[in-house]
Image (spheres, rainbow, N blue to C red):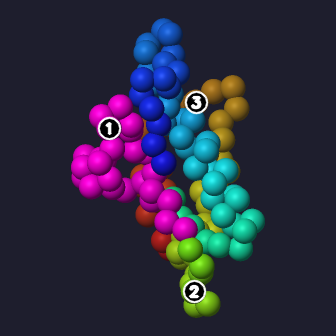
């Protein structure tokens, strides 16, 4: 999934390119449709964009956001062990204040999910 950086919307006050948000929304909808068709997929976001652009011969203005392999699931496939684990809601939701939140707190919590 890519977006065209020449036409993607940029926030007027800081010029941040929102193309990655739009591409992410489309990718999510594609995964839902793939599942609806009885197929499987996963969102791959860990890749070197320069290598993808070179190997797929993408023009400079197309920005890769996600890879989306699609196919039939193996009968023995299973989600990752952390798929269903979640942070405690008190670590992720704050009401009217960010008191108690510290930089890196979620990184520490990630290790706790493995327990």
> Is 75 rendered above or below residue 69?
below
Mark 3 and mark 1 lie on one chain; the one further toward the N terminus is 1
Residue 19 percent across, percent down from the top left: 49, 31
Please identify the quarter of the rendering in which residue 78 is found: bottom right
Mark 2 and mark 1 lie on one chain; the one further toward the N terminus is 1
Q: Nearer the viewer, residue 79 or 43?
A: 43
Residue at mark 1: 59
Residue at mark 2: 74
Please identify the quarter of the rendering in which residue 40 is found: bottom right
Q: Nearer the viewer, residue 105 or 62?
A: 62
Residue 65 within the magenta-colored segment of the rendering: yes
Residue 84 in sight from this viewpoint: yes
Name the residue at 63% across, 27% down. 97
57 lies left or right of 103: left
Mark 2 and mark 3 lie on one chain; the one further toward the N terminus is 2
Name the residue at 54% across, 35% down. 21
Residue 89 within the magenta-colored segment of the rendering: no
Task: Write the start and end of the magenta stretch as one range.
Answer: 44-70
> Is 103 rendered above or below residue 108?
above
Residue 17 percent across, percent down from the top left: 45, 25
């Amino acid at each position: 999934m890519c977006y065209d950086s020449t036409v993607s919307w940029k926030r007027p006050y800081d010029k941040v390119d929102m193309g990655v948000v739009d591409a992410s929304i489309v990718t999510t909808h594609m995964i839902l449709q793939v599942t609806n068709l009885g197929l499987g997929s996963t969102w791959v976001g860990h890749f070197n964009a320069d290598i993808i652009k070179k190997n797929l011969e993408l023009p400079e203005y197309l920005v890769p956001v996600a890879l989306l392999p699609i196919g039939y699931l193996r009968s023995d496939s299973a989600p990752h062990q952390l798929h269903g684990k979640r942070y405690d809601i008190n670590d992720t939701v704050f009401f009217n204040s960010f008191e108690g939140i510290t930089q890196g707190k979620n990184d520490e919590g990630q290790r706790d999910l493995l327990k």
